[in-house]
Image (cartoon, grey):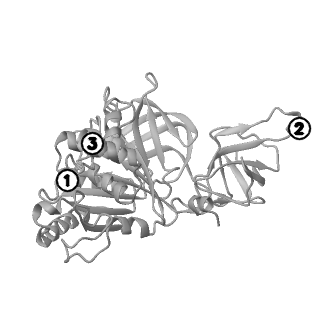
């Protein structure tokens, strides 16, 4: 096997990092990149020179990600910076999300595709409101694995007692959340303890380093492999004379597996046919599954357009116009309007939607339901019910993160005002 093929075939882990200001997130990411030798020499030299100019005692690892932070402050990105690195075992994509409460929406954006979340805690401060909020959002977004990094252990004399107290405190809070897999690692991002290598400072900790954990954790299939879902994005009609009879339906598989010969049913028309072939830019495939983008050709000429969904008989998504949603509000200009009308985007489909009822808001720090104040504003999370102008074909977010998520768009300004998870 060539090196190129083996790299392409490597497993990919997407993870998000969250922590409040000065918990050492940038330093931790810098340490991971530096100690896995995935930083270019010129970047390292520039960071070393900047550290010396600033009078820092050691190399300031946070400077390795500061360029991205500057970009975010200029409003170029949506406050989520992505970093890529790889080891011989796995490829990684890090979504570095801001920690402030006013950036809850950005954390939701960055965490929405993650398999794992790293939540940082300053060992001196222990579990604070932001820690609870980050854990709640990770749980809400169905992130299966959470690694709780207790950082700055060097500032509490690498105390096992401090570590154990914070673990106990967080476990009490987390017992009210749905988290499938939780791990705790005491680290010092500044000096590298338990990030990539073990040091002598914490002999009482017998667990893996952070990198070992990231390289070896089993994340399983990233998406639902049971329920076949193919939202049609584009109808391909080549104009070349040689292919005048070619008609393909392009899109990205959102769940399950499709193979040539499979019987399919189109929603919303209900027509059935069989798959003739599955094509990609590189040729035909024997099967297609998430996250592949493909073009499907079928045996019969039936009317299929953008926004339709290809599924299989006996395995349909839910269908309805009344949708129950957990929502994170993104808009700075306007709050959610009761009886307000919005454009709802779900997979490749757009419909009009009316806010029927605001059921409650959630205090993300205590997890209490707020039922006496139903005004949902920027960065707030609440449960609402929507009525759509046409039926949607959806799964619950718990079952399928793609067919179970929606966004709301303001019909006048075209601004994306909210992201929601169908219950």
Q: Position of residue 194 (x, y in %)?
A: 27, 67
**Whether label 3 touches label 2, CB < 8 Å:** no
Q: Residue at x 72, y 55 (%)?
A: 264
The residue closer to the viewer here, 337 or 8, is 8
Label 1: element kind: loop
Q: Crowdedness of circle 2 by 10 Å Cα count: few (<14), some, many (20+)?
A: few
- Whether residue 135 is visible, yes or no, is yes
Q: Residue at x 19, y 77 (%)?
A: 204
Q: Position of residue 285 (x, y in %)?
A: 73, 57
Q: Depth-wise, is mark 3 or mark 2 nearer the camera?
A: 3
Q: Is residue 12 left or right of residue 366?
A: right
Q: Outermost residue toward the top?
A: 412
Q: Residue at x 47, y 38 (%)?
A: 387
The residue closer to the viewer here, 231 or 43, is 43
Q: Depth-wise, is mark 2 or mark 1 nearer the camera?
A: 2
Decide: is 43 above or below 410. below
Q: CA distance from mark 2 to mark 1?
A: 64 Å
Disc assigned to residue 242: 2
Q: Position of residue 27 (x, y in %)?
A: 26, 51
Residue underneath mark 1: 366
Disc assigned to residue 49: 3
The residue closer to the viewer here, 324 or 305, is 305
Q: CA distance from mark 3 to mark 1?
A: 44 Å
Q: CA distance from mark 3 to mark 2?
A: 61 Å
Q: Depth-wise, is mark 3 or mark 1 nearer the camera?
A: 3
Decide: is 218 above or below 139. below
Q: Crowdedness of circle 1 by 10 Å Cα count: few (<14), some, many (20+)?
A: few
Label 2: element kind: helix
Q: Earlier in the sequence, mark 3 or mark 1?
A: 3
Q: Earlier in the sequence, mark 3 or mark 2?
A: 3
């Amino acid at each position: 096997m060539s090196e190129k093929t083996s790299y392409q075939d490597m497993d990919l882990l997407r993870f998000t990092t969250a922590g409040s200001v000065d918990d050492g997130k940038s330093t931790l990411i810098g340490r991971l990149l530096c100690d896995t030798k995935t930083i270019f020499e010129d970047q390292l030299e520039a960071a070393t020179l900047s550290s010396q100019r600033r009078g820092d005692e050691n190399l300031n690892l946070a400077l390795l990600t500061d360029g991205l932070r500057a970009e975010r402050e200029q409003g170029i990105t949506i406050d989520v910076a992505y970093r890529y690195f790889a080891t011989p075992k796995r490829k990684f994509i890090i979504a570095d999300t801001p920690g402030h409460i006013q950036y809850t929406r950005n954390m939701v954006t960055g965490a929405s595709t993650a398999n794992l979340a790293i939540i940082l805690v300053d060992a001196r401060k222990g579990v604070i409101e932001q820690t609870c909020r980050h854990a709640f959002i990770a749980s809400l977004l169905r992130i299966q694995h959470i690694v709780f990094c207790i950082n700055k252990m060097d500032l509490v004399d690498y105390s096992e007692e401090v570590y154990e107290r914070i673990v106990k405190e967080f476990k009490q809070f987390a017992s009210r959340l749905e988290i499938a897999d939780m791990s705790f690692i005491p680290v010092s991002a500044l000096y590298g303890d338990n990030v990539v290598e073990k040091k002598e400072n914490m002999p009482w900790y017998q667990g893996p380093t952070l990198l070992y954990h990231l390289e070896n954790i089993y994340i399983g299939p990233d998406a639902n492999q049971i329920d076949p879902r193919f939202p049609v994005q584009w109808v391909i009609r080549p104009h070349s004379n040689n292919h005048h009879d070619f008609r393909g339906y392009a899109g990205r598989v959102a769940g399950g597996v499709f193979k040539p010969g499979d019987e399919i049913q189109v929603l919303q028309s209900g027509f059935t046919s069989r798959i003739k072939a599955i094509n990609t830019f590189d040729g035909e495939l024997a099967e297609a599954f998430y996250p592949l983008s493909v073009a499907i050709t079928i045996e019969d000429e039936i009317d299929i357009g953008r926004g339709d969904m290809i599924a299989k008989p006996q395995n349909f998504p839910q269908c309805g116009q009344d949708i129950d949603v957990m929502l994170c509000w993104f808009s700075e200009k306007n709050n959610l309007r009761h009886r307000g009308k919005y454009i709802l985007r779900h997979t490749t489909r757009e419909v009009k939607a009316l806010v029927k009822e605001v059921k409650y808001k959630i205090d993300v720090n205590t997890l209490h339901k707020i039922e006496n104040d139903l005004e949902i504003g920027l960065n707030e999370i609440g449960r609402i019910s929507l009525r759509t102008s046409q039926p949607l074909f959806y799964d619950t977010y718990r079952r399928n993160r793609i067919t179970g998520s929606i966004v709301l768009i303001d019909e006048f300004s075209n601004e994306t005002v909210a992201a929601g998870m169908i219950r």
